[in-house]
Amino acid sequence: MMGSSQTRQEAFDVLNDALHAFVRVRPTGQFSMAESPLHGWNIAIKDCFDLAGDIASVGTPMFAARRATRTATAVQRLLDAGACIVGHTQMVELAFGGWGINAAMGTPRNPWDGRTVRVAGGSSSGSAVAVAARMVPAALGSDTAGSIRMPGALCGITGLKTTFGLIPEDGVFPLAPSYDSVGPMAQSADDCARLFEVLTATRLPPMQAPHNSRLLVLDSAAYPVPVEPGVQHALDAAVNVFTRLGTHLSKSSPPFALADLTRDAGTLIGAEAWTVHGARFEMDPSAFGAGLQRRFEQARMADSGSIAAARGARVQASERFRRWLQADEVLLLPTVHCSAPALDSVDERGSPLGQFTRWVNHVGGCALTLPAGFDTLGMPVAIQLVGRAGTEARLLALGSAFQQATDWHRRVPDLAWATDP
């Protein structure tokens, strides 16, 4: 253990220099009284969350001097519960990207590989890295198409995509308002549950044992893209764990193609992002990074008929989802199709990382990503539990049971490479 707060801060700074998890670190104040729910918790917040008096640059140089005049309700609830906010974490520019790349503000490095620079996933990239590297026990992220779950999966942590509108989003800079949601990222499902209660100002019912729970396993024939062997192996192993825990498992295929929902969601997210940022883009396209320029050019050229058709299809898909997945059922599937690739191999213009996540936002569900093992390269792989709106308690209970039976969430990356002189 470090001998002084200065030494701890120096070690923190050295680690951050290697991982680029934080864009700004703030001096921590005194913790609240010991009976506070989050007494002793240092929590990081994604760079799109407002904290009065602090800069929240939303991952873009154009907002480098954007100082918040208020505190987001979600952040205030953490503060009121006794947490210390230690800083804003790096993110994809304007939260519009899945691999975690931000050339202008800094791309966080996946902490699990000291030899090859690998992506952390996005857009809540820095939050995932900070938790995975144990710089903080928990962080706040936002999820529009998988932005909590994708980096959570690639970095080997637990992340909860909450039901749309369940956690207030005031003071959180939007990307696509009808898709955006706020959620916790932490080392375990139990930690996420504790944060969920604070963030929603509610109490979860007592955790129920998983026996007799109904778990649907997504049939591999319904996969929108092939998955890497390490991911499928982890999913199969998780099925065995849940079987031993007494859950009732059965294979199932959705009444829609996940790839179609991913495509329609992309259309609508682009249209909503254009509504938020279009005027700014028209004024000065050069203020946006190259990747964002391509995305907004596509959004500007989107056909109104295609947008209307995607909206109509979304309503139908949401209804089919509610008819297919019952309130007492949970869907088990991969979170992402791969482990973290090398940074220099990634192209944002290729197949999106969110093929297994984006559709959940599209139909209005909630989801939990859980560490589920490692592939042959030693990189984390993950599983995902998906439920209907408002079923977070069921997901968290199953996630907690899974983590009591496994230790993947307790694994810590060897960061000697990042801290040795």
Image: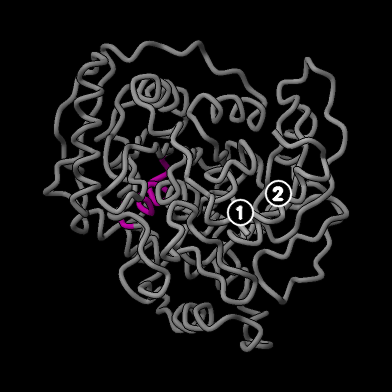
Which secondary structure, mark 1?
helix
- Amino acid type indicated by mark 1: Thr
Q: Main secondary structure of the magenta part?
A: helix
Disc ID at residue 149: none
Q: Is residue 34 above or below residue 374?
A: above
Q: Is residue 163 magenta?
A: no
**Considering only order in the chain, which callout, 2 or 1, is on the residue closer to the N terminus?**
2
Residue 317 image position (x, y, % from top left):
30, 49
Instruction: Say what secondary structure mark 2 lies in.
Output: helix
Query: Dot 2, crowdedness within 10 Å: few (<14), some or many (≥20)?
Result: some
Q: Nearer the viewer, residue 185 or 166?
A: 185
| Location of the N terminus (image quadrant) | top right
- Name the residue: 65% across, 52% down: 46
- The one nearer the camera, 164 or 235, is 235
Total numbered labels: 2
Foreground of the two, 105 or 351? 105
Q: Quadrant of the C terminus?
A: bottom right
Q: Is residue 94 left or right of residue 334?
A: right
- Residue furthest left as drawn: 221
Amino acid type at circle 2 is Ala
Q: Are marks 1 and 2 in contact (CB under 8 Å)?
A: yes
Left or right: 8 in relation to 180: right
Residue picked out by circle 2: 11
Dot 1 alpha-carbon crowd within 10 angstroms: few under 14, some 14 to 19, many 20 or more = some
Q: Report the magenta residues as a range.
A: 355-365
Left or right: residue 343 compared with residue 168: left
Q: What residue appears at the point 71 percent right and 26 percent down from the top-left corner?
A: 38
Q: Which residue is mark 1?
A: 419
Q: Is residue 261 above or below residue 366?
A: below
In the current view of this chain or complex, which residue is farthest to the front? 421
CA distance separating discs 1 and 2:
8 Å
